[in-house]
Image (tube, rainbow, N blue to C red):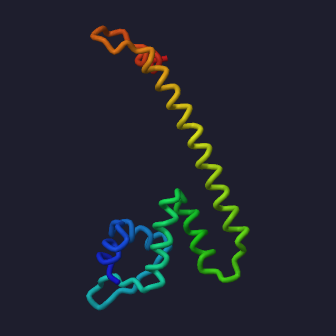
């Protein structure tokens, strides 16, 4: 498949596909007209990558997962540990976001939101 076809099919930009090629996740063959051509194996890797990215995995984690995807002798324990690590990271981020939410809610409650210049939000940010 050509890069434009893959881009449309997977709903990712051609630029992203080129980036994935530059960092070695996928590879293409160059045709006589210098167009990139990606085989089914690379299409499968890209599908895998898109799904993994939607689950929050970083590109480095995706590289590791793709290696495991291609390794018939992989241990599911290894994959599970990577997923557990990602879940721990996501839970930490959720907790941090909840703390931010509470702080903003508190500041919004303190701010009268009137025509006067006094603003507890500005005061807090200026500390």
Q: Quadrant of residue 84?
A: bottom right
**Residue 90 drawn at (x, y percent):** 58, 49
- Residue 22 vs 110, above or below: the answer is below
Q: Tell me what residue is drawn at x 44 percent, y 73 percent.
A: 21
Q: Tell me what residue is drawn at x 62 percent, y 43 percent.
A: 92
User: Where's the N terminus, which quadrant?
Assistant: bottom left
Count of marks, rendered view: 0
**Residue 104 drawn at (x, y percent):** 47, 26
Out of 28 and 43, give the one closest to the viewer. Answer: 43
Q: Position of 125 compared to 74: left or right?
A: left
Q: Tell me what residue is drawn at x 55 percent, y 66 percent.
A: 62
Q: Tell me what residue is drawn at x 47 percent, y 76 percent.
A: 26
- Residue 88 vs 125, above or below: the answer is below
**Residue 107 drawn at (x, y percent):** 46, 20
Q: Position of 89 compared to 102: left or right?
A: right
**Residue 119 drawn at (x, y percent):** 38, 13
- Residue 98 vs 13, above or below: the answer is above
Q: Quadrant of residue 38?
A: bottom left
């Amino acid at each position: 498949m050509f890069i434009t076809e893959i881009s449309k099919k997977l709903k990712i930009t051609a630029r992203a596909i080129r980036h994935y090629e530059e960092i070695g996740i996928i590879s293409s063959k160059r045709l006589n007209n210098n167009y990139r051509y990606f085989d089914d194996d690379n299409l499968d890797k890209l599908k895998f990558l898109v799904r993994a990215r939607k689950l929050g995995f970083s590109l480095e984690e995706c590289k590791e997962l793709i290696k495991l995807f291609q390794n018939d002798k992989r241990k599911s324990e290894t994959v599970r540990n990577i997923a557990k690590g990602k879940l721990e990271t996501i839970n930490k981020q959720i907790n941090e976001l909840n703390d931010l939410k509470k702080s903003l809610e508190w500041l919004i409650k303190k701010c009268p939101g009137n025509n006067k210049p006094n603003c507890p939000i500005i005061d807090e940010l200026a500390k």
